[in-house]
Image: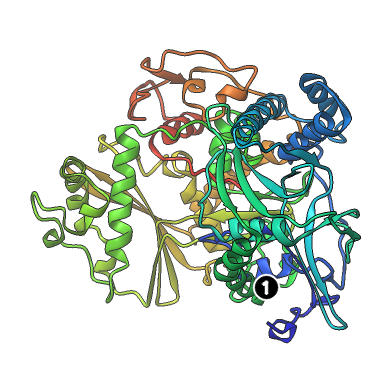
């Protein structure tokens, strides 16, 4: 592909023909911004007006610490635990206590996995030794330079006939047929050893091997002691070249071509953030009067985690792996109901939901993601929805579950939201959130902005013009087994707007200033996905009710059992955490 197929957007400078990719960048992401990916692949393209980059005052890449520890063990002769202590002690930025626990666990898991690999190969008469230099494939001409590498651990047999690349995964296994696997195999087979820094020098100083490889392996190591290593590729260099050409080269060509812009979490690190027309700027959106420690991304999920426990919020931001996702009946009910609504509202012609869509005993299209038992339970909730379906009204545009992002330059925060439905028409915006509950009076109109802060954020997004109009309505649809009700809030109502500003400012203020993220242990620890890394984790009977600010919550369903007063925002956060599944976003 010629470099003329892509040119830097306005406001950027630098050679667009210098392209560097790592194998992991080729893995597809459903919500990845194509233009961000193309810009990231061009390390020498930067804004004409540079801004001083602010770095977090804590270690924000614990996987990098794992690599440092393994370097000390494999190349400098350190004992594993001594290496861990040394790396944590000498880290330029302090690691959170929970991150430090995970680093130690991850290092031990890698060494255990490495022993498994060694034993397997020993049975074949093959031994490997670590290589300090990464491998890189690079091609340069008068007009462009292409560099492809892979981030992980490198090994080879003493005679060089066998080469192996080990990809480190934080928690989840990857796909054997993924483009990244093909790219890693290609680099292992054809790449030269880099004596310079692959990420700081272009071109990279490289050196030849004494012998050509006859066998190439790509092994995945999930940094968990219960996950054995997995061989993703084991074949000849010729096979690696063929697989790369079939699976990875087309993906790489598409990636560096760029394309549409999709605002989201990528925006925080994007080179065109300040001038991207797809990312609305809304100064003062969060109601903060300072820019915090550095640029970050914030969402209601971030706020909920922080309300429950600052340490949990921090560890999730670091992508420290969580435990198995909870699958209680309330969570499963919410998942299948929302999936049914997403599909139904996305049908051609914007057809409103009707009772005919919910025949008794026949799940219809829902059979692909619901069991008959789940359909029987969900049907009662969905029949209530039929009477308040937003598609009963005429709209010019309807979008289900879009990703919304906006940048608040006053706070230096990218705000991300995931509404259930957005509709536009007549110069107004309709923003709807949907909840399922067994209690008809669980969400009252008076406390809704506090208990469901997504609504408060939605009011501010409309008021600041993020959704294309400053006029609109925010709705909360509450579905129960006996019917559904909708609470509506006019984003132009001064009282509604003032309450929304109060709720959001309170949620974001402490998080924005925090640099310690201390644990707040309590009965909610039993459901915390990162509890096993937390030194302050508190044991709690998982079947016992959870008490938060005088509110008793059922740990199985998330329903409020008893309260002497209104449900506080923190109690609502704990309740929502038990009902709404927490997505796992793993960067590697």
Q: Which residue: 49% across, 52% down? A: 496
Taking the image as shown, residue 305 lies to the left or right of residue 70, namely left
Establish if 548 lies above or below 27.
above
Residue located beneath label 1 in the image: 256
Query: Residue 407 location in percent, x, y?
Result: 67, 60
Taking the image as shown, residue 463 lies to the left or right of residue 106, namely left
Please tell me which residue lies in front, 15 or 295: 15
Q: Which residue: 70% across, 81% down? A: 6
Place residue 561 in its image quadrant. Answer: top left
Please tell me which residue lies in front, 279 or 395: 279
Establish if 475 lies above or below 155.
below
Place residue 412 in its image quadrant. Answer: bottom right
The answer to whether residue 503 shows anywhere in this view is no
Say few, some or many: other residues with alpha carbon within 10 Å of mark 1 (under 14 / 14 to 19 / 20 or more).
many
Establish if 67 lies above or below 286.
above
Please tell me which residue lies in front, 518 or 98: 98
Query: Residue 520 location in percent, x, y?
Result: 61, 22
Place residue 179 in its image quadrant. Answer: bottom right
* Figure colour scheme: rainbow
Establish if 135 lies above or below 248.
above
Query: Residue 202 location in percent, x, y?
Result: 88, 65
The answer to whether residue 162 shows anywhere in this view is yes
The quarter of the image holding the N terminus is: bottom right
What secondary structure is found at the residue carrying circle 1? helix
């Amino acid at each position: 592909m010629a470099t003329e197929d892509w040119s830097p957007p306005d406001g950027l400078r630098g050679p667009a023909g210098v392209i560097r990719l790592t194998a992991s960048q080729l893995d597809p992401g459903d919500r990845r911004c194509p233009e961000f990916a193309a810009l990231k692949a061009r390390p020498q393209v930067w804004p004409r007006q540079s801004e001083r980059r602010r770095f977090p005052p804590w270690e924000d890449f614990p996987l990098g610490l794992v690599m440092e520890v393994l370097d000390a063990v494999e190349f400098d002769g350190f004992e594993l635990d001594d290496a861990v202590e040394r790396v944590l002690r000498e880290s330029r930025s302090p690691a959170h206590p929970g991150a430090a626990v995970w680093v130690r666990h991850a290092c031990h898991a890698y060494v255990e996995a490495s022993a498994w690999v060694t034993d397997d190969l020993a049975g074949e008469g093959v031994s490997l030794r670590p290589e300090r230099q990464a491998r890189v494939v690079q091609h340069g001409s008068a007009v462009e330079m292409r560099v492809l590498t892979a981030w992980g651990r490198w090994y080879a047999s003493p005679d060089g006939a066998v080469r192996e690349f080990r990809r480190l995964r934080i928690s989840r296994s990857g796909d054997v047929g993924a483009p990244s696997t093909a790219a890693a195999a290609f680099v292992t087979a054809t790449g030269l050893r880099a004596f310079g820094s692959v990420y700081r020098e272009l071109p990279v100083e490289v050196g030849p091997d004494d012998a050509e490889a006859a066998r190439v392996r790509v092994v995945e190591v999930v940094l968990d002691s219960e996950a054995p290593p997995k061989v993703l590729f084991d074949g000849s260099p010729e096979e690696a070249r063929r697989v790369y050409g079939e699976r990875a080269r087309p993906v790489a060509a598409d990636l560096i071509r760029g394309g549409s812009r999709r605002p989201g979490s990528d925006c925080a690190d994007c080179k065109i953030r300040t001038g991207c027309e797809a990312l609305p700027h809304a100064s003062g959106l969060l109601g903060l009067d300072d820019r915090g420690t550095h640029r970050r991304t914030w969402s209601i999920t971030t706020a909920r985690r922080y309300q429950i426990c600052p340490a949990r919020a921090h560890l999730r931001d670091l992508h420290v792996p969580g435990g198995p996702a909870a699958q209680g009946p309330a969570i499963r009910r919410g998942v299948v109901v929302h999936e049914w609504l997403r599909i139904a509202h996305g049908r051609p012609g914007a057809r409103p939901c009707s009772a005919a869509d919910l025949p008794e005993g026949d799940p219809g299209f829902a059979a692909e993601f619901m069991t008959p038992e789940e359909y029987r339970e969900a049907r009662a909730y969905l029949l209530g929805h039929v009477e308040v379906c937003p598609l009963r009204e005429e709209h010019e545009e309807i979008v289900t579950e879009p990703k919304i992002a906006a940048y608040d330059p006053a706070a230096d925060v990218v705000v991300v939201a995931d509404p259930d439905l957005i509709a536009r028409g007549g110069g107004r915006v309709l923003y709807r959130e949907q909840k399922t509950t067994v209690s008809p009076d669980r969400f009252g109109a008076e406390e809704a902005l506090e208990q469901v802060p997504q609504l408060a954020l939605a009011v501010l997004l409309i008021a600041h013009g993020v959704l294309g109009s400053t006029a609109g309505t925010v709705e909360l649809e509450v579905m129960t087994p006996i019917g559904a009700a909708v609470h509506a809030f006019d984003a132009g109502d001064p009282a509604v707007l003032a309450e929304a500003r109060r709720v959001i400012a309170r949620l974001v203020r402490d998080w924005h200033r925090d640099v310690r993220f201390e644990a707040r242990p309590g009965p909610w620890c039993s459901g915390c996905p990162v509890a096993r890394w937390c030194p302050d984790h508190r044991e709690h009977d998982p079947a016992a009710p959870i008490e938060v600010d005088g509110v008793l919550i059922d740990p199985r369903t998330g329903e409020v059992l008893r309260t002497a007063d209104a449900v506080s925002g923190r109690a609502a956060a704990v309740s929502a955490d038990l009902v709404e599944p927490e997505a796992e976003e793993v960067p590697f």
